[in-house]
Image (cartoon, grey):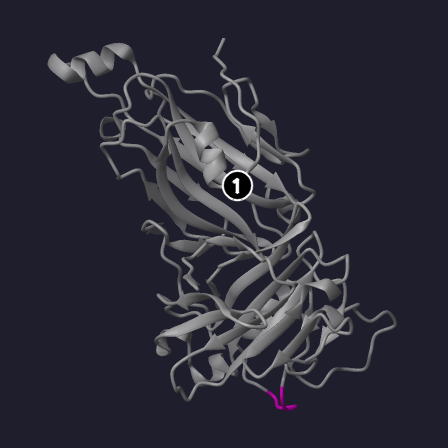
Amino acid sequence: MMELGKGQKIPLKENFLTFKFERPTSALEIDTAAFLTQANGKVAGDEDFVFYGNARHNSGGVILENDAVEIDLNKIPRHVEKISLTATIYDAEKRRQNFSMIRGAVLKIFSRQNEIATFPLENFTVENAIVLGEIYRYKGTWKFNATGAGFSGGLAALCKNFGIEVNDVAPPPPPPEPPKSKINTRREKVKIPPPPVEPTQPKKVELRKGQKVNLTKKGAQLGEIVINLNWSQPPPSSGFFGRFKSKGIDLDLACLFELKDGTIGAVQALGNHFGTLNYPPYIALDGDDRTGSVAAGETIRVNGKFTDKIRRILIYTFIYEGAANWEEAKGVVTVKCPGSPELIVRMDEYGSTKHTCAIALLENVGGTFSVEKVVDFFDDSEQMDHAFDWGLSWTVGRKD
């Protein structure tokens, strides 16, 4: 039995599995659910939402039993690419409850015979809904991602993210062409008060290593995501720093990408792979600052209109020329998206003589992106690729 950390992925070698949400004794009413989504991150229909009002998927592949979800991977329909397991607090906004009130909660994974893994769920604040984890297809096999991503808005917000329109009160007379998905997630037909005003978000959030924050989705699409790297050269001086300056450090911003159709690749100045915004991979690098003197630094842009086509993005940097003196470079990455606080990732681990640093991992969660601070160092891009199970082939290259 292993203990998983946030973002850790493991292969699922058994076909019949049970995922159980366990918590200490608590007065809070917790509901578990599962969303069976297509490659676009949305359910195909209401039947692909398994919750207390629909406890058994019509394929028999997903069955809800109290706080446990039983999954038979052999029975999952072909159109399903991912199964997102969730936990929500019933009537949380009305009762002013959130997951900070529960301590020691864990998600446990069982095969028919043994407990396979446990995933501690902690460090939540105002969230009243959690994406516990994701079971997803990867190159013909199934894997599990320990997500642990918190949301506000309860089950209704999760349904909206996964493509289900929620009706919490008695419906009006049906229009001529009713919406495709209309599910009542209320246990009783009661009229609820308007939702409280959302608390003001902080303008900036500096991430800790391993911390994961979700970008806010306004409407049907995310806005453009702007990822910027800034670093500095040391001032001219004698001695060691003089030698560092004379060599000229060239710190490059780059990313690995994986699309939902299985396409993988890299966007980087080396090899002139600058990407494109309106066509795959929907990611573009603005330019190449070879000196660190350009005020704007280097910028990668992600087209938020195509979030449903992107599975994950690994932001990294490498020192093309110069000594591997990360402390002198003082690298800072910022992630900006309309409606979300500006996220700051400082490259504040020093002393490594390795030339490549994985900075942040963006993963598609219910149609938006979670952003996690990584800051891990590697000898080269190929070693980093293997660590994150990307699967690219690498050759030595140079800039023109």
Total number of numbered discs in the rendering? 1
Can you tell which quarter of the image residue 353 is in? Answer: top left
* Residue at image location 31% in from the left, 32% down from the top: 331
Relative to 290, say whether 354 is above or below.
Answer: below
Q: Inspect this view and state whether residue 52 appears.
A: yes
Q: Quadrant of the N terminus?
A: bottom left
Q: In this rendering, is residue 27 above or below 126?
A: below
Give the residue pinned by disc 1.
389
| Residue 297 visible | no
Is residue 190 within the magenta segment? yes
Locate residue 68, reporting x and y percent. Answer: 56, 77
Q: Is residue 298 left or right of residue 240?
A: right
Percent x, y of residue 102: 37, 78
Q: Residue furthest front?
A: 113
Residue 131 x/y as whole percent: 52, 65
- Farthest residue to the left: give it: 239
Residue type (three-letter) at the residue carrying disc 1? Asp
Q: Position of residue 312 (x, y in %)?
A: 55, 44
Residue at 62% over, 70% down: 34
Highlighted magenta segment, given as a residue range:
187-191
Residue displayed at 57% across by 74% down: 155
The overriding secondary structure of the stretch rendered in magenta is loop
Image vertical order of residue 6 relative to residue 112, above or below = above
Res 355 quadrant in image: top left
Q: Along the line of sight, which residue is nearer the eye, 177 or 315?
A: 315
In this rendering, would 293 be left or right of 84?
left
Q: Residues within 10 Å of mark 1 (few under 14, many from 20)?
A: few
SS label for mark 1: loop
The answer to which quarter of the image holds residue 237 is top left
